[in-house]
Image: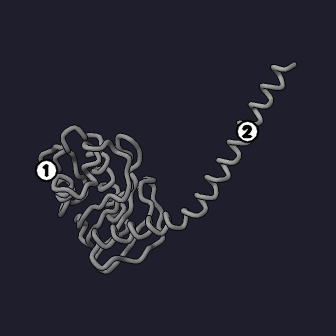
Amino acid sequence: MSNVKYILRIALMLLLITSVMAAALAAVNQFTEPMIAAYQAEKTQKAIEMVLPGGGEEISFTDASGMVSTVYASETGYAVEVNPVGFDGAITMMVGIDTQGNVLGIRVISHTETAGLGAVAAADSAKGEAFRNQFLGLVNGIVVDGEENSIDSMSGATITSKAVTAGVNAALDFVANLG
């Protein structure tokens, strides 16, 4: 009988500790959630302005590909938020496209790619900028390591390179189908 009491006492202590910790985590989450949302909105707004000079207004749309999440339009073009799947999960990025269907710019908003490899696509470094700048001026149907209308993949990060390219192509397809 003493073993049962001992086990119940330990189980109740663990239940009490986990309940207190869960309540503490919930309180911290409730406190930080608005700040995180504000930071994410600011980061998205900066990405829009980087790929579409002057920014744009959000428009309603339907997307058959499932990759386009938000679209912003202006007189000069579109900023399209896409979510391709990379090596280690979704890559949220903003793609700027002018009214003639040319890529104006790319900005990665969030990702979970491998540091030093796929994460280079989002890095504010010479390699990251060089990778993203390859897309400038290209049109629909971009391929990786091809002959025409192509970009060079990042060394050791072919899956990420293909995912970013798929996201850019999804944005280009979407804008082309807007009419």
- 2 or 1: tag closer to the N-terminus: 2
Q: Which of 32/99 is in front? A: 32
Q: Identify the residue position indicated by label 2 in the image.
A: 15
Q: Is residue 144 above or below residue 45?
A: above
* Res 89 label: none
Q: Position of residue 79 (x, y in %)?
A: 34, 68
Task: Point out the residue furthest to the right here.
Answer: 1
What amino acid does circle 2 point to?
Leu
What amino acid does circle 1 point to?
Glu
Asked whether disc 2 touches disc 1, contact meaning CB atoms under 8 Å apart, the reply is no
Q: Position of residue 52 (x, y in %)?
A: 29, 72
Residue 45 falls in image quadrant: bottom left
Q: Which quadrant holds the C terminus?
A: bottom left
Give the crowd class for mark 2: few <14, some 14-19, many >=20 residues within 10 Å.
Answer: few
Q: Identify the residue position indicated by label 1 in the image.
A: 148
Q: Position of residue 102 (x, y in %)?
A: 22, 65
